[in-house]
């Protein structure tokens, strides 16, 4: 952020005043009476520099559980709107459709949404929402009673010998969900598509542009088919078309990504000359590691075939070691000889270290005068220091925003003190049984309406009598905001403990109902039997969990959904060559029935190609600005791996 931006953000935060025109439509209850809108506090932390009510607003939109059914139950979906950073924005926002199904996005404005999409705000508002059965919109299909009763085993697997098996826990969750849901079969991609259109109409936008990643691409495609009105353009990045057997063929993208590495080397003359039979080398190394892993030594872990597969698979994430692809041919060649030099360098972060100013200038140093070199070094050192300063400023702005938010709500530090004292008190009992009982009761607060009586009912029967008077006095002193803060903290803690099971449930509610029996255990086994490299079944992608759990949630198939989507809405189809979650073949397949599609292949990008480079962001921004024109994609050439050749 520039100094002027920092000053503006701080003054906006401390003033606490918003213009009457900021988000006026949302504050008025929305633009469409069929889909009422309410405002609620955004999850913390907020992205640095964002001011709630001025640059960002969060809320809920009320939609039918079953669109088109007059007497349908109503459900509420969480959304966020981030304003364009211009006084003359384009009228059509960008709508980010998250993956999963079930991931959610509103709680991740600071960590996912803004880092990926902030540059789109130079011209447009940015809208995102948690789809039904996802994130903050998953309450209507949660099983908090079942999860609360099992919170100890969920927080610390194996700590309780009598922990319920996953399948049994899942089955009980399904029973609770069915009892609480009006129509569990309504949790599907088509209803999600209607929700997307309903939200944008409620927010008052005449047109919008969709950007979907992973499952978000399947949702974007379904919007194009079932609720296309208002959609101006679409970007589908890391594509999961509805008519491909993505679960049966879960290992296909990993195999494609390895093949793409071999093909890129073969197409690069120096790489092809240095490594003329790279595929043969790969096969030999796999066979050797399968038979005889390289033992743990050199202060390093054992190198197994699974570790090699994980190296390829790791490129799917932006957090992986940089430049894996460039080093793969040399790594394989060395492993074929029993050497580990490049493997050790890469896997211990050798490519992650930022070069010093001197290292950056090394190639040009001979051409520089002492004065030029000193000035260049000063500027490079200053740039490095600014990185640290920027991170500190962002953290300080977020902390200031959170602190002011607590003050404005009327909260004090009593909620924090209560939590600390309660923890000290129950721990002091030294009783395993008492502590387990307390944790289960504590988790039960997540389903209750915040109240002082609820806090008293938690502590009075469970804590030592000598500790009760000061704790009950704390409860009496609390403001209503303090009480809400305690319950919010409980809900947050519980959701963290439940995260893995909730994520599985959110995924299965949609996937089991609409992807089965289109996908099947038999189809999964048949595809794996057809793999070019059968040893890929050792990868983490070889996961048959859903075939065990989905029979507990009977399918609700919609045959028309499992067909290709045809549309003439301008669409950009994006895929990364290192993506091991969604298939490049499937991405090109999806484009075949989109009459105005442009296909973008991105080297050195994994799942969610936009995350990996500025180039993809720039292409996406240019496409949304002018969907009818082909964007300049020349920057893609600079992303191609520069393969490391053998020494000498």
Image: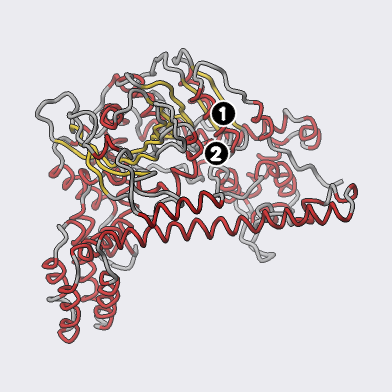
Residue 549 percent coordinates (x, y): 29, 43
- Tell me which residue sits at (43%, 24%) in the image: 234
Tell me which residue sits at (18%, 45%) in the image: 177
Label 1 or label 2, whichever comes before in sequence order:
2
Instruction: State the scheme by which the image is colored.
Output: secondary structure
Q: In which quarter of the image is residue 427?
A: bottom left
The residue lying toward the viewer, choosing from 198 and 510, is 198
Q: Name the residue under label 2.
A: 606
Relative to 287, is 14 on the left or the right? left
Q: Name the image quarter holding residue 187.
A: top left
Q: Is residue 586 above or below residue 474?
A: above
Say above or below: 356 vs 309.
below
Name the image quarter holding residue 79: top left
Q: Is residue 547 visible?
A: no
Secondary element under disc 1, as helix, strand or loop, is: helix
Q: Characterize the local packing of mark 1: few (<14), some (14-19) or many (20 or more) Cα atoms within 10 angstroms.
A: many
Residue, disc 1: 619
């Amino acid at each position: 952020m520039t100094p002027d931006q920092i000053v503006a953000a701080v003054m906006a935060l401390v003033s606490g005043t918003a213009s009457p025109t900021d988000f006026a439509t949302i504050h008025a209850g929305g633009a469409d009476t069929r889909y009422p809108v309410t405002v609620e506090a955004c999850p913390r932390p907020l992205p640095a520099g964002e001011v709630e009510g001025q640059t960002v607003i969060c809320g809920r939109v009320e939609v039918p559980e079953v669109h088109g059914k007059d007497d349908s139950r109503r459900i509420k979906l969480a959304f966020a709107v981030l304003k364009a950073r211009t006084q003359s924005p384009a009228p059509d926002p960008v709508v980010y459709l998250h993956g999963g199904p079930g991931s959610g996005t509103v709680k991740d404005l600071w960590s996912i949404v803004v880092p990926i999409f902030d540059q789109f705000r130079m011209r447009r508002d940015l809208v995102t929402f948690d789809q039904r059965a996802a994130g903050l919109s998953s309450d209507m299909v949660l099983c908090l009673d079942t999860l609360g009763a099992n919170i100890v085993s969920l927080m610390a697997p194996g700590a309780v010998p009598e922990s319920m098996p996953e399948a049994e826990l899942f089955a009980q969750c399904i029973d609770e969900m069915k009892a609480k849901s009006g129509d569990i079969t309504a949790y599907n991609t088509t209803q999600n598509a209607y929700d997307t259109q309903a939200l944008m109409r409620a927010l008052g936008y005449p047109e919008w542009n969709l950007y979907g990643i992973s499952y978000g691409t399947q949702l974007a495609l379904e919007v194009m088919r079932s609720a296309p009105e208002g959609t101006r353009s679409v970007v589908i990045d890391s594509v999961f078309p509805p008519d491909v057997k993505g679960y049966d063929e879960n290992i296909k993208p990993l195999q494609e990504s390895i093949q793409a590495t071999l093909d890129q080397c073969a197409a690069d003359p120096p790489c092809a000359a240095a490594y003329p039979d790279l595929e043969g080398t790969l096969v030999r190394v796999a066979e050797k590691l399968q038979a005889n892993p390289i033992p743990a030594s050199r202060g390093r872990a054992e190198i197994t075939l699974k570790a090699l597969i994980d190296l390829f698979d790791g490129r799917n994430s932006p957090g992986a070691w940089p430049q894996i692809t460039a080093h793969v041919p040399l790594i394989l060649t060395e492993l074929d000889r029993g050497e580990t030099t490049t493997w050790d360098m890469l896997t211990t972060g050798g490519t992650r270290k930022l070069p010093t100013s001197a290292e950056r200038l090394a190639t040009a140093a001979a051409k520089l005068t002492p004065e030029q070199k000193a000035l260049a070094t000063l500027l490079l050192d200053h740039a490095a220091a600014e990185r640290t300063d920027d991170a500190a400023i962002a953290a300080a702005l977020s902390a200031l925003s959170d602190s002011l938010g607590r003050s404005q709500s009327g909260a004090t530090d009593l909620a924090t003190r209560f939590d600390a004292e309660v923890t000290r008190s129950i721990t002091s009992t030294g009783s395993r049984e008492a502590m387990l009982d307390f944790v289960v009761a504590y988790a039960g607060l997540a389903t209750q309406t915040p109240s002082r009586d609820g806090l008293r009912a938690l502590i009075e029967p469970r804590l030592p009598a000598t500790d009760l008077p000061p704790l009950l006095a704390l409860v009496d002193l609390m403001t209503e905001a303090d009480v809400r803060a305690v319950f919010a903290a409980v809900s947050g803690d519980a959701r963290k403990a439940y995260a893995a099971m909730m994520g599985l449930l959110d995924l299965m509610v949609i996937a089991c109902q609409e992807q089965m029996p289109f996908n099947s255990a038999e189809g999964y086994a048949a595809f794996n039997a057809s793999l070019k490299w059968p040893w890929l079944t050792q990868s983490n992608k070889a996961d048959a969990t859903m075939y065990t759990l989905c029979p507990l949630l009977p399918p609700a198939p919609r045959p028309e959904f499992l067909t290709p989507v045809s549309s003439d809405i301008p669409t950009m189809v994006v895929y990364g060559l290192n993506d091991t979650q969604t298939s490049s073949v499937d991405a090109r397949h999806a484009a075949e029935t989109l009459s105005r599609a442009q296909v973008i292949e991105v080297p050195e990008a994994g799942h969610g190609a936009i995350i990996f480079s500025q180039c993809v962001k720039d292409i996406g921004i240019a496409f949304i600005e002018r969907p009818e024109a082909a964007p300049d994609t020349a920057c893609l050439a600079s992303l191609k791996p520069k393969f490391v050749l053998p020494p000498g």
